[in-house]
Every structure is written in structure tokens, then in C-alpha cells.
Amino acid sequence: MSHIRSRDIETMSPDQREEMLDELREELLQLRAQQALGGSASNSGAYKQTRRSIARMLTRIKQEKE
């Protein structure tokens, strides 16, 4: 679930965005733990995708507040 497109974010309600943001942050935490323990090669791009998805989500949330 680490990659979320901007179109998907736009169709979500504000509550759904907040919930998804929490899930993405939890996933990032797990990926960091895997990396610290010598993570698997299959998840090499998941960390970057998750970070970018969080950034997209935060950008959209902040745009709506303005």
C-alpha cells in the first residue's frame, strides 16, 4: 500500500486522508525497523515510495486548510 496516487488522495474525504496518513506513517516505521535490521532486497523502493506518499498526503491536507 506504500504508493498512493494524487488522484486517489483527491477523491478521499478528510477523515479518510487522516486515517490513511496514520497507516502510511505506521508502514514507514515498520520499513525503518526492517532497514535497521538488515532489511530484505525486495523492499528497496518501498521506503522511498512511502515517504513520497506521506508528502503527497500532507500537501493535500495543508492545501485544504488554506
Image (cartoon, rainbow, N blue to C red):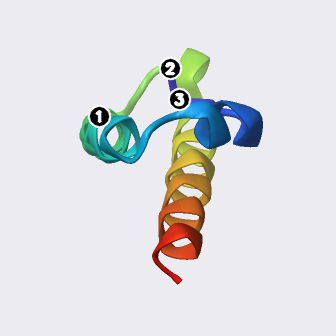
Mark 3–mark 2 distance (CA, rounded to whole Å): 4 Å
Which residue carries the number 3 mark? 2
Seen in the picture, residue 3 relative to 22 is either above or below; the reply is above
Circle 1 sits in a helix, a strand or a loop, which is it?
helix
Q: Which residue is mark 2?
A: 1
For the residues bearing labels 3 and 2, Cβ distance under 8 angstroms: yes
What's the residue type where badge 2 is placed? Met
Q: Residues within 10 Å of mark 2 (few under 14, many from 20)?
A: few
With 16 as the anchor, is 3 left or right in this view?
right
Q: Of 11 and 28, which appears nearest the observer?
A: 11
Report, in whole angstroms, how far the alpha carbon at label 2 lies from the one at label 1: 9 Å
Amino acid found under the numbered disc labelled 3 = Ser
Local crowd size for mark 3, using a 10 Å CA cut-off: few (<14), some (14–19), many (≥20): some
Q: Which residue shows up at 58% across the image and 16% down it?
A: 42
Q: Does residue 43 lie above or below 55 as drawn?
A: above
Please tell me which of labels 3 and 1 falls first in the chain.
Answer: 3
Residue 40 located left or right of residue 29: right
- 51 horizontally vs 18: left or right: right
Per the image, the residue denoted by label 1 is 23
Looking at the rendered image, the disc whose residue lies closer to the viewer, 3 or 1, is: 1
Q: Position of residue 66 (x, y in %)?
A: 53, 83
Number of other residues with Cα within 10 Å of mark 1, as a class: few under 14, some 14 to 19, many 20 or more: some
Under mark 1, the amino acid is Glu
The image position of residue 28, as x and y in percent, is 36, 43
Residue displayed at 41% across by 43% down: 17
